[in-house]
Image: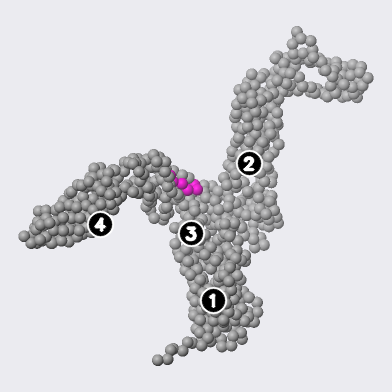
Amino acid sequence: KCGTHNLRKMICTWDISSEGRQTVNGHTDFCYTNNDLLPPVCFKTKEKRVEIPVPESSSMVTITTNSISGTALATKKFEIHKKDISLVPLTPHILSLTPDFSTSTLNLKWSDNGSIFPYGLDAFWQIQILRKEGMEKVTQALYYSKLTHEDTILSWNWTSDMPLECTSHYVKIRCYINATQFAGPKDWSNWSPMEEVPGKDTDPNGSGVFPQDTVVAVGSDVTICCVHEEGQQILQMTYGRETYPMIHLSSRSSAIRVLNASASDTSGTNVVCMLSEDGMEGTVLFVGYAPDVPQNLSCETSNFLTIKCTWKPGRPSGLYGKRATKYSLFERISGKNVSCEVNEINKDRACGFQVQPDQKVYNFLLGVSNPIGQTQSSLLVNLTQRVHPKAPEKLTVSSNSSTSVHLHWFINGSFADIRLLCQIEVSSGHSGQKMHNVSMAGGKFSTYVALVNTLHPYTKYRFRVRCSAADHFWRWSDWSRIEEHTTLEA
Amino acid sequence: MAAADSPSPGLRRRDLCSRGIRLAGKMRSDVVDLLDTYVEWQGLDASASVAAVEGVPVAAVERWDEQTGTQRLLENLAAYRTFRALLAQMLEEQQEQLGEADTALGRALASVLLQVSAFTYHLEELLQLESRGTPSEEVDVPVPPSQLGLFERKLRGLGVLRELAQWAVRSARDLRQLAKPSPGSSSAPGPDESP
C-alpha cells in the first residue's frame, strides 16, 4: 500500500504472510522502476516500508525476502498505479494559541507547510475547539488557504461565547489538500496535537466571577461563570435580583447564561455567586448602548478666538463615569484634535476649539466612542459664515442734539475680518418701538458708535442693541442691556 | 469690669463630650440613611453578609469598661482618621465609576465624610484638653480599590459603612463615660451590647 504526503515521494508498506514471518529474518531486497526504459533501482531494507518517488503513471515493484543467511526465500512483483496512491498531508502543528481574555478571543497560528507542495494548490483546514472537563466539541470551523510553495504562517481568531477564564479551551487542526490533478484518493491528515488555554478553574488561586466588570451591549447574550475552590459548592447564582439555572463546566466552575441583557442601572448589574461555607464572589456587568450618531452638529464663533461646536447626543448610552461616552473633535485641515469635556446627564454637548491663525474654513470630525462602540459626525464650515457675537456691553447714550443721540457699545471679540450689522431698538412711551439697522466695519475688541436721529426733543427713550455678521448672516447676538435717555429740550 | 472667668477643664470637657455625643448621634442616623442609599444605588442585597474588611477599625471591643478615658479617645481618634481616609477613597472611586450620574449617593457620602472629619477634630480637641498631644496623622489606608473587582469594592464599601455605624454608637458611649465626673469608673453596658 502506498501513500504520499507531498505528491513527490510516496511511502510504501507491505506485509508478509503469517508462515513466511517465521523464516524471513534477514533483509529484504526492494527494486522499483517508474519507467520501462530505465533499469530498476534496488536497495536492501530491514523495514517493511520504503520511501520512493511518486510515478508519473505507475511503478513496477519487486520485493524479495531473504533468510538470515541471505538465501532468497520469496519474490513478489507489484504494479502500483497512480490512482492507487493515496494523498494524506502530514499532520499539521499549531505554532501558537494565544488567548485575549479581555475579548474572550483565541488566536491560532500554524504553518501551512506549503514548501513541500507545488504552487497554487488549495488547502482546507478543519479547526476544532473543545471545552469543559469532558472535552466537549464547541465548534468546528473550515478555513481555506492557497499553498504558495513556501511555508506560510496562517492565523485565525475565534471569539468564545464565554470568558476564557471560565474553563480550559482546547484546539486541534487537520488539513486536506485539494490536489485536483492527483488521481489517487485524498484524505484528511491526522489531527494535530491538542493545544490548551487553561481556565481559572485549573488555577489554585483562580476563584472569581468572570467576566470581571465588563461592558456589553443591550440585547447581548452573556455567559457569566463562577470559579470556586475545590470542595466548595455553588448555592446559587443571581444576575441582578434574579436567580439563574446553572451550567456545569467543571468541578470548580459553573456558569449562567443571560439572554437579551437589558440596560443596567447606573452602578451596573451585580452578578453574585453564593458559595457554601459563607463564600461569596461577584462581578458587575454594565449593559448599555453604543453611542448614537451625534445629531445637529453645529459650530460657530462668538469672538474669532474660539469655535464652539454643539450637538445633540441622541440616545443616552446608559454608561457613566469612566465608561461614559467620550467625544473628541478633530479638524482635518489643521490636524488638531481636542477632547471634549461632556456631562452624560445633561442633554446638550459642547466642545471648544481654538481658532487657527489665517484659517477661515474648518473641516470638523466629531469622534464619539464608548466601550461598546464608536461613531462620528462631520461638518465643513466657513467661520465667517458662522458668527454669533456676544451681547453688546457697556451701552452708553449721549445727546448730540435735541433730536439725535450717539450710542456707544463694546463687543468682546476680534471682528476685524468682517463687517458687522447691528440693530438698534428705540422705544418710547408715545412713539412705540422703532428699529434702526446700521452696518459697520468690525474691529478688534472695539467700541462701536452709531447716530440715531429723527427723535423728539425732551423725550425719554429706551435703547438696546444687538449685532450679527453683515455678510452671511448667521445669528443675532443677544440684546444688550436697555439704556434709558432723555433727549435735550428743543 | 472683671474678665469673664474661663470655664474649668472639667466643665469644658463635659461640654465637649455632650457636643460630641450629639455629633455621634447625628452621624449615626446619617450613616444609617447612607447605608440604605448605598445598598439601593449599588444594587446590593441589604442582608448581604460581608466578611470583615481588612483595614477597617472594628468597633467591638473586649473589656470596654476597663478602658481609661485616654485609651477611649486614642482608639476613637485612630478609627475616625481611618474612616476619613476610607470615605474619601470611596467618594473618589464613586466619582470615577459613576461620574456625573451619581448625585444622591455622592452627596450623602460627602456629607458623612464631613461629619467624620468634624468628629475627628472634636476628638483631637478633647485629647488636647487631657493635655495629651494628638498622635501623628499617618493613616495606612488598606488595599487600594484598584486591585479589587467592582463587586468586591461595592461589598467593601458596605462593610465600611456598617462598621462606621457601629463606631458611632460606641463613640457616644465612650463620650458618656468620659463625661462622668470620675473618669474611668463605669457602669454603662459594653458597646457590643445592643443599645
The C terminus of chain A lies in which quarter of the figure? bottom left
Magenta segment main secondary structure: strand
- Residue A487 horizontal side relative to residue A388, left or right: left
Foreground mark, 4 or 2, reads 4
What label does residue A393 carry, if any?
4
Q: CA distance from mark 4 to mark 2?
A: 66 Å
Q: CA distance from mark 2 to mark 3?
A: 36 Å
Chain for numbered disc 2 = A
| Label 4 close to label 1 by CB (< 8 Å) | no
Q: Residue furthest right?
A: A69
Badge 3: few (under 14), some or many (20 or more) residues near its Cα, within 10 Å? some
Q: Residue at x 37, y 52 (%)?
A: A348
| Label 4 close to label 3 by CB (< 8 Å) | no
Q: CA distance from mark 3 to mark 1?
A: 30 Å
- Residue A322 horizontal side relative to residue A451, left or right: right
SS assignment at label 1: helix
SS assignment at label 4: strand
Q: Residue furthest left?
A: A490
Badge 2: few (under 14), some or many (20 or more) residues near its Cα, within 10 Å? some
What label does residue A98 carry, if any?
2
Q: Position of residue A399 (x, y in %)?
A: 13, 58
Q: Tell me which segment is drawn in magenta.
A: A367-372
* Residue hosting label 1: B124
Residue type at tag 3: Gln
Residue type at tag 1: Glu
Label 3 and label 1 in one chain = yes
